[in-house]
Amino acid sequence: MDGMETSDIINLELPNYVENMRKQSTWGGAIEIQCACNIWKIRVLVEDVRRQMKHSIIEFIPINNIYEKTINLKWSGGHYEPR
């Protein structure tokens, strides 16, 4: 999604995205992971385990590329889980 503004992505997702995300029953995704990276200065490595032959890693880093800690998650296409 290089070149796209976060607000454009959110508008594609849902007209009331922020309001919907404030509900305790709503699950977060890539946008929320990126926000967490920026707020808490962490790097998040997400292992996409959907591919049986080749596991791929999706890296989320703070916008300024400076982080103090790395968290590892796995993703099977549904929920994110600790790895």
Image (spheres, helix red, strand yellow):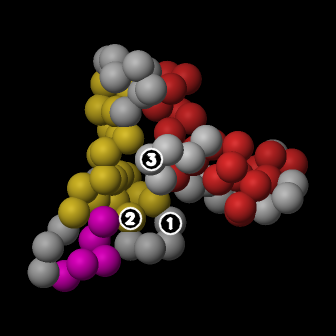
- How far from the left and from the top, in percent, is residue 82? 37, 52
Question: Which residue range is magenta in the image?
Answer: 48-52
Q: Identify residue type, mark 2.
A: Trp
- Label for residue 79? 1
Which mark sits nearer the N-terminus, 1 or 3?
3
Q: CA distance from mark 1 to mark 3?
A: 24 Å
Closer mark to the observer between disc 3 and disc 2 = 3
Residue for badge 3: 2
Residue 23 seen from this side: no
Residue for badge 2: 75
Image quarter of residue 65: top left
**Residue 69 vertical placement versus 80 (above, below):** above
Residue 58 seen from this side: yes
Q: Residue at x 31, y 53 (%)?
A: 58
In the displayed orientation, state which residue is furthest to the front: 3
Which is more toward the observer, 8 or 33?
8
Dot 2 falls on a residue whose secondary structure is strand
Q: Residue at x 86, y 48 (%)?
A: 19
Q: Identify residue type, mark 3.
A: Asp
Q: How many marks?
A: 3
**Residue 64 vertical placement versus 3 (above, below):** above
- How far from the left and from the top, in percent, is residue 15? 85, 58
